[in-house]
Image (cartoon, grey):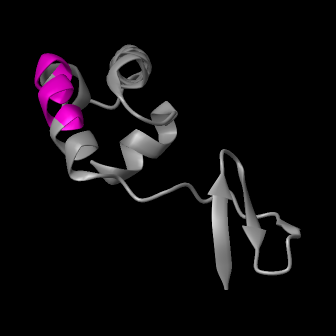
Amino acid sequence: MVKACLNTFIIDANGKKCNNKRAFNFSSKENILISLIKEKYVSQIENKKTDTNANRLKTEAWVKLAKEFNCCGDSYRDAQVLRNII
């Protein structure tokens, strides 16, 4: 049973650290914020090309999106987490 989630680890009911890296669920405010920020980068993020340059641009777009999200959001989310939920 999970008691609380702290940044990069979970504290179980006994007060011990677990190795899981699970954060809180996204709030509705965060989901809306991600959608609004994603609109700026949609052409890069949803590009169907998979060559080196396109992949580099996609990664850069996700990093920029994560920076903007973390400036406005309630909690820290890295680019990989944001990439997995969209």
Q: In the displayed structure, would residue 75 be above or below residue 65? A: below
Q: Residue furthest bottom?
A: 1
Q: Quadrant of residue 82?
A: top left
Q: In the displayed structure, would residue 55 be above or below residue 20? A: above
Q: Quadrant of residue 58?
A: top left
Q: Position of residue 39 (x, y in %)?
A: 10, 25
Write down the region rendered in magenta. 33-41
Q: Position of residue 71 (x, y in %)?
A: 40, 16
Determine if residue 48 is in view. Answer: no
Q: In the displayed structure, would residue 11 be above or below residue 70? A: below
Q: Position of residue 5 (x, y in %)?
A: 63, 59
Residue 83 placement, left or right of 19: left
**64 is within the stretch colored magenta:** no
Determine if residue 20 is in view. Answer: yes
**Which is the main secondary structure of the residues drawn in magenta?**
helix
Viewer-proximal residue among 13 and 51: 13
Q: Quadrant of residue 68?
A: top left
Viewer-proximal residue among 57 and 6: 6
Which quadrant, please, contains the N terminus? bottom right
Residue at the spot 64% in from the left edge and 64% down from the top edge: 4
Viewer-proximal residue among 29 and 41: 29
Residue 74 placement, left or right of 6: left
Residue at the spot 33% in from the left edge and 21% down from the top edge: 72
Residue 8 placement, left or right of 30: right
Residue at the spot 41% in from the left edge and 59% down from the top edge: 25
Residue at the spot 35% in from the left edge and 53% down from the top edge: 26
Q: Position of residue 12 (x, y in %)?
A: 76, 75
